[in-house]
Amino acid sequence: MISAVCNKIFEQSIHDYHRIDHIDTPIANPYPSSSLLEHLLYHKNWIDTVQWHLEDIVRNPSIDPVDGLGLKRRIDASNQERTDMVEYIDSYFLDQYKNAPLNPDAAINTESPAWAIDRLSILALKIYHMQAEVNRAGATAEHIKACTDKLTILLEQRKDLSTAIDELLNDIAGGRKFMKVYRQMKMYNDPELNPVLYKQ
C-alpha cells in the first residue's frame, strides 16, 4: 500500500532531521532518483519538516523584525517548493496510471493523490511533535493528558487518511476515478502577475 510507504519515509525523514535539529541542515536524501517515488516523498517531507521549524521560529514575539521578514520570505520560498513537489508526485501517479482503463462513469476526486499525501506528511509532523509534548520533561499532568488526547486523535486521522489514499489510488487503477494535475499558478510569487511587483 502506498500509504504505508509514505508513512515509513515520512517518519524516517523527520527522524533524520531531528538528529541535528537545525533549519540549515542540508538534505541527505537516502533514496536515489532512480527510486523516484521514494526520493520525492523524502524530499517532500524534508521541506515540510524544515518549514515546520521555520514557522515556530518566526512566531517568537521577541524576534528582530528584520530577521522575521527574512524568515517570512524563506517560508514563502519553501511553500513554493512544497507546491512544486506535490505537482511532481502527482505527475508520477499520472504516469503510473496513464494506461488504466477508464469506466464510463468514472469521477474525479475532490483532491489529487499528492495533495492527500501532502496532508499525510504534515500529519506525520503533528504526531511527532505531539508525542514529544506527551514525553516533555517537567510538563504538568494536565498538559500531558491534553496532549495524549490530541495524539490519539492524530493517530486516528492518520489511519483514516492512509485508508482514503490507498482507496483513491485503487479506484484510479481500477478506472473508477481519474486524476488531473492542476498547476497551482500562484500569482503572488510571479513578478508578471503580482501587481505590487510588476508596478515597481
Image (spheres, grey):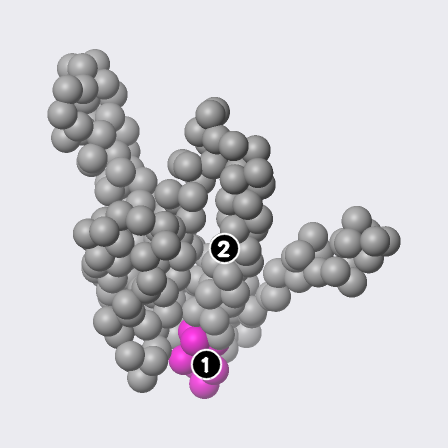
The reply to whether the magenta stretch includes residue 150 is: no
| As drawn, 19 above or below 81 | above
Q: How crowded is mark 2: few (under 14 residues within 10 Å), some or many (20 or more)?
A: some
Occupied quadrant, residue 93: bottom left
Q: Which residue is drawn at 45% across and 85% down?
A: 99
- Number of numbered discs present? 2
How far, Cα to Cα, is label 1 from label 2?
A: 26 Å
Residue linked to disc 1: 95
Question: In the shown orientation, is residue 24 left or right of residue 107?
Answer: left
Q: Position of residue 199 (x, y in %)?
A: 86, 53
Could you say which is closer to the camera, residue 143 or residue 77? 77
In the image, what residue type sits under mark 2?
Answer: Ser
Could you say which is closer to the camera, residue 26 or residue 15? 26
The reply to whether the magenta stretch includes residue 99 is: yes
Q: Where is residue 22 in the image (x, y as percent from the top left)?
A: 31, 49
The magenta segment is 92-101
Q: Is mark 2 on a helix, strand or loop?
A: helix
Question: In the shown orientation, is residue 200 left or right of residue 102?
Answer: right
Q: Position of residue 83 (x, y in %)?
A: 52, 60
Q: Is mark 1 on a helix, strand or loop?
A: helix
Question: In the shown orientation, is residue 18 left or right of residue 115?
Answer: left
Residue linked to disc 2: 78
Q: Can residue 110 be seen in this view?
A: no
Q: Residue at x 24, y 26 (%)?
A: 147
Work out whether mark 1 precedes mark 2 in sequence or the reverse, and give the earlier one.
2
The residue furthest right is 199
In the image, what residue type sits under mark 1?
Answer: Asp
